[in-house]
Image: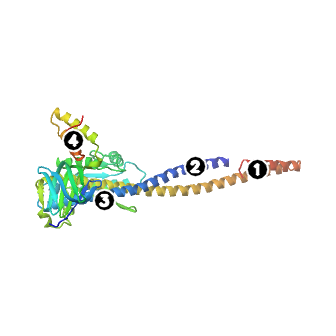
């Protein structure tokens, strides 16, 4: 593999291209497969994603954190494309709102199984980790 | 008296002028929204291109084509039409174009002994079709100006449910495609089952076979197809919104031009009526003076002067 080869990363939502940039590494989480990292020269890959905290290691050394709420990832040559109905950059995340959403979802789940609340909890979790908050709720 | 007619005309001119102001404002608003709507159409292109590419790769890689989404049903008994119109009128032939196309398709289906159901999107479609007693599904309205992706998801879920449950065997999308600000066309596009030719066309076979999948291709495809349907609906809604604004702009422009023409004609008629009434009045005064001329000459001249002065100060001449 060529030294210094980089990946072009694009995060595309139905309404717009949310983010695009040059990266050395991209880490995301596929359904059933756990976390997966892509480096330049990765074999062509197609996967379906769960709610997760996607990390993009940019060529300039910084890390772009993104909360991706499901979708698909396609790797082709040196291009990584994430298709997601809903994704948020770390800077856009409203932490207090995500915390409230998590508490609400946990409350609902204590009273019984609820697929919607579970999804809400996963979304809130993805938001909070992407925004740099640990799993412990601040009270 | 002639003055009465003049007053009526003045009132009409004023009302046409007020209408013209409104149509001009609507024209300008529509014109500015076309640009925004066009940008949204453009912004949605990357996603729909990517998702089409992914579906194509999956289909080429041998993901199960048995899913009715791709294969379709052997016998089409019921067709569902999604008619995309505006929530409001005052946009020329925009709504009628779509509704006429839907009616044509429905009539052809009825003649062929098939069933149909229409899903009206936009208030105009719903009221028009309900009044004419067509078989309607759930209606979606309130967003024709600037549709959000959530609206597309709602419609997508509804039609996918209809299809999966077997209530319909085919879903067609009827909307107005935005080609440019000057030209739009009503199109009928198959939505479900997917147009396999459109999906597979243009794909470089062979390259896609090397993909790794996580989880397996069939599972991904089953997740992906509803998203694909939603993306198609979203693109259609955005196109329809841009077309609606273009139609409205054109309709309001011709309404404004028409109002200008009307005002010109009405003022001409009004001016003539005013001139007529002034002439008549002068004739009356002169006639009256003539009748008095047997008496004091100076007195008559004074009366005429007085009458004319009266008219002048009240601004009638």
Name the quadrant containing residue B186.
bottom left
Give the residue at mark 2: B14
Q: Do the residues labelled 4 and 1 touch (CB within 8 Å)?
A: no
> How far apart are the alpha carbons under marks 2 and 4?
58 Å
Sequence-first disc among 1 and 2: 2
Subunit ID for the residue under disc 3: B
Mark 2 closeness class: few <14, some 14–19, many ≥20 residues within 10 Å: few
Query: SS at mark 2?
Result: helix
Residue at 23%, 36% in the rendered image: A138
> How far apart are the alpha carbons under marks 3 and 2?
42 Å
Sequence-first disc among 3 and 1: 3
Query: SS at mark 3?
Result: strand
Give the residue at mark 1: B284
Q: Nearer the viewer, mark 4 or mark 1?
A: 4
Give the residue at mark 4: A120
Q: Are marks 3 and 4 on the same chain?
A: no
Q: Are marks 3 and 1 in contact (CB under 8 Å)?
A: no
């Amino acid at each position: 593999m060529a030294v210094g080869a980089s990946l072009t990363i694009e995060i595309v939502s139905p309404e717009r291209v949310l983010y695009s940039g040059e990266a050395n590494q991209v880490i995301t989480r596929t359904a059933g497969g756990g976390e997966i990292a892509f480096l330049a020269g990765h074999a062509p890959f197609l996967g379906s994603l769960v709610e997760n905290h996607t990390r993009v290691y940019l060529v300039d050394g910084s890390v772009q954190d993104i909360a991706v709420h499901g979708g698909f990832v396609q790797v082709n040559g040196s291009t990584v494309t994430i298709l997601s109905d809903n994704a948020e950059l770390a800077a856009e995340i409203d932490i207090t709102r995500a915390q409230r959403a998590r508490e609400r979802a946990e409350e609902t789940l204590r009273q019984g199984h609820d697929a919607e609340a579970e999804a809400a909890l996963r979304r809130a979790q993805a938001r909070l980790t992407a925004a740099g908050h640990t799993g412990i709720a601040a009270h | 008296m002639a003055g009465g007619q003049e007053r009526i005309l003045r009132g009409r001119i004023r009302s046409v002028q007020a209408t013209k102001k409104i149509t001009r404002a609507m024209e300008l608003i529509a014109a500015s929204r076309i640009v925004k709507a066009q940008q949204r159409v453009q912004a949605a292109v990357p996603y729909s291109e990517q998702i089409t590419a992914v579906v194509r790769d999956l289909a080429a890689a041998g993901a199960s084509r048995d899913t009715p989404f791709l294969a379709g049903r052997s016998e089409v008994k019921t067709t569902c039409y999604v008619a995309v119109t505006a929530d409001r009128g005052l946009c020329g032939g925009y709504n009628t174009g779509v509704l006429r196309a839907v009616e044509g398709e429905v009539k052809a289906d009825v003649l062929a002994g098939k069933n149909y159901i229409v899903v009206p999107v936009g208030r105009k479609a719903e009221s028009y079709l309900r009044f004419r007693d067509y078989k309607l599904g759930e209606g979606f309205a309130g967003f024709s100006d600037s549709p959000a992706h959530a609206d597309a998801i709602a419609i997508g879920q509804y039609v996918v449910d209809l299809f999966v449950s077997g209530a319909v065997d085919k879903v067609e999308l009827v909307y107005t495609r935005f080609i440019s600000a000057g030209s739009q066309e009503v199109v009928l596009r198959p939505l479900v089952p997917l147009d396999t030719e459109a999906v597979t066309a243009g794909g470089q076979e062979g390259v896609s076979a090397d993909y790794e999948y996580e989880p397996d291709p069939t599972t991904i495809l089953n997740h992906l197809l509803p998203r694909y349907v939603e993306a198609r609906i979203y693109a259609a809604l955005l196109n329809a919104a841009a077309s609606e604004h273009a139609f409205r702009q054109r309709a309001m422009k011709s309404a404004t031009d028409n109002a200008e023409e009307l005002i010109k004609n009405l003022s001409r008629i009004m001016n003539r009526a005013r001139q007529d009434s002034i002439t008549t009045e002068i004739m009356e005064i002169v006639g009256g003076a003539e009748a008095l001329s047997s008496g004091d000459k100076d007195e008559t001249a004074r009366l005429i002067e007085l009458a004319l002065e009266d008219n002048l100060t009240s601004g009638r001449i």
